[in-house]
Amino acid sequence: MKELETVLNTLSSLIWGPVMLAFLLGIGLFLTLGLKAFPWRYTFKSFTLLWNSRKTSQEGDISPFQALMTSLSATIGTGNIAGVATAISLGGPGAIFWMWVTALFGMATKYAEAVLAVKFREVDALGSHQGGPMYYIKNGLHKKWHGLATAFALFGAIAAFGIGNMVQANSVADAVDSMFNIPAWQTGLIITLLTASVILGGVSRIAAVASKLVPTMAITYFSGAIFVLFSYFDQIPAALYLIVSSAFSETAAIGGFTGAAVWAAIRFGVARGVFSNEAGLGSAPIAHAAAKTKSPVQQGMIAMLGTFIDTLIICTMTALVIILTGAWTSGETGAALSTLAFNTAIPGWGGYIVVFGLVVFAFTTILGWSYYGERCAEFLFGVKVIKPYRFLWLCAIPVGAMGKLGIIWLLADVMNGLMAIPNLIALGLLSPIIFEMTKDYLYPTSN
């Protein structure tokens, strides 16, 4: 077991090293430039599109709004609470600046993924719309690239059990045990039963639940963070200055914080940013492919809001609470650091905001990733795999809740990185189509 852990550690370091981080940021930068900063220029119009898309009769399985909520259900999770705290504890406040950079360029990546997902989607034997990297590789690229589609689907089907299932269940079980003294097996059983009641109804039920839970919990968590920000309102400029200045200079040791070099800020900021918003991994377009829309560009505009909401809003709120309260110098890390920060600002109640946020966000992540993993498995084995995959998914939840997940974390980390590689290659090769479709949408009479 130790040998396996060593191998996975080495693979994780290689996959998430400078080359991968540069690849992720490089594709995002390339797409942003090729789109002439279209995602930044049309952010507010995209929110209008999202609001108007709640009810639509276009071709697809779920509304564009529900597609975004399903996507957000999988991305808003432990990364927004524990991941942000980990980035700060390892890379200093400057890591948040690099999370912002990752998100800004990630908006173009997420836009491109959704555009291709809708354009190259298919209808399966059950009449459901299927899409994502495996389909835009298969239907958009030459046969010599089709092995990438199989590779993505294989990595995605496996990675889902880590990042989207057992890791989330374990985080919930730990949080509930520490706050309410409820044993992990009981928490695991409850999560399993709740998950079964949703995922057995397919994407329509997942989308319906996500479209209610995600906005409610996001607004609740955001409101708690805003309360803290108002309490420390006069210190916000200094906190923002600390974030920006620390991004380009070494952060000195202070209190329980051991200090961090600039490279650490970049590395952990980018890595945690990608873990949180998943831009470039290729997971979110699987949900957007099911949207009721005939316009790939419009769905892409809605999709890119996922990165904006996840990282530039929710992650930023968590980061500011941690920095403003001074908790970042405590030496704590992960969810414990976020809990300490909220408890410092809102004694007695702050911890409950973090715990309930973590529980609901992690639960919705389990729902969203169940759909992603299932679609990847279906691409490999056909519709006959759906029921067995759902059964295995439910069995993995209590195992994750009660287990020690060191190796599972590492395996999920490796598989996530491997998912990104075929997806990023496909985005680069198919970028002319993305640019042309965007141009045609903006200037429909130019041809």
Image (cartoon, grey):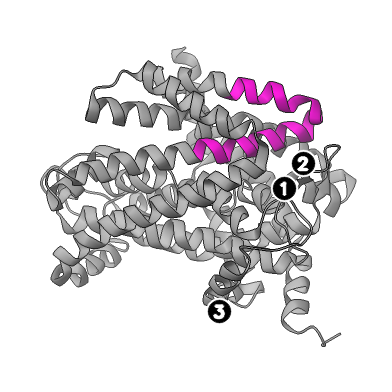
Image-quadrant location for residue 51:
bottom right
Span highlighted in magenta in the image: 365-393
Residue receiving disc 2: 149
Q: How far apart are marks 1 and 2 (CA)?
A: 7 Å
The furthest residue to the top: 1
Image-quadrant location for residue 187:
top left
Residue receiving disc 1: 133
Circles 2 and 3 in contact, beta carbons < 8 Å: no
Viewer can see residue 262? no
Q: What element carries label 3?
A: helix
Q: Is mark 2 on a helix, strand or loop?
A: helix
Query: In front of the other: label 2 or label 3?
Result: 3
Q: What's the residue at 50%, 24% (across, down)?
A: 193
Residue 274 in picture, x, y percent from top left: 49, 50
Q: What element carries label 1?
A: helix
Circles 1 and 2 in contact, beta carbons < 8 Å: yes
372 in the magenta segment? yes
Residue 265 in picture, x, y percent from top left: 34, 53
Q: What's under tag 2, amino acid-wise?
A: Ala
Nearest the camera: 45 or 91? 45
249 in the magenta segment? no
Residue receiving disc 3: 41
| Circle 1 crowding by C-alpha within 10 Å: few under 14, some 14–19, many from 20 | many
Viewer can see residue 129? yes
Q: What's under tag 1, amino acid-wise?
A: Pro
Mark earlier in primary sequence (2, 3): 3
Q: How far apart are marks 2 and 3 (CA)?
A: 32 Å
| Main secondary structure type of the part rendered in magenta | helix
Residue 50 vertical placement versus 384 (above, below): below
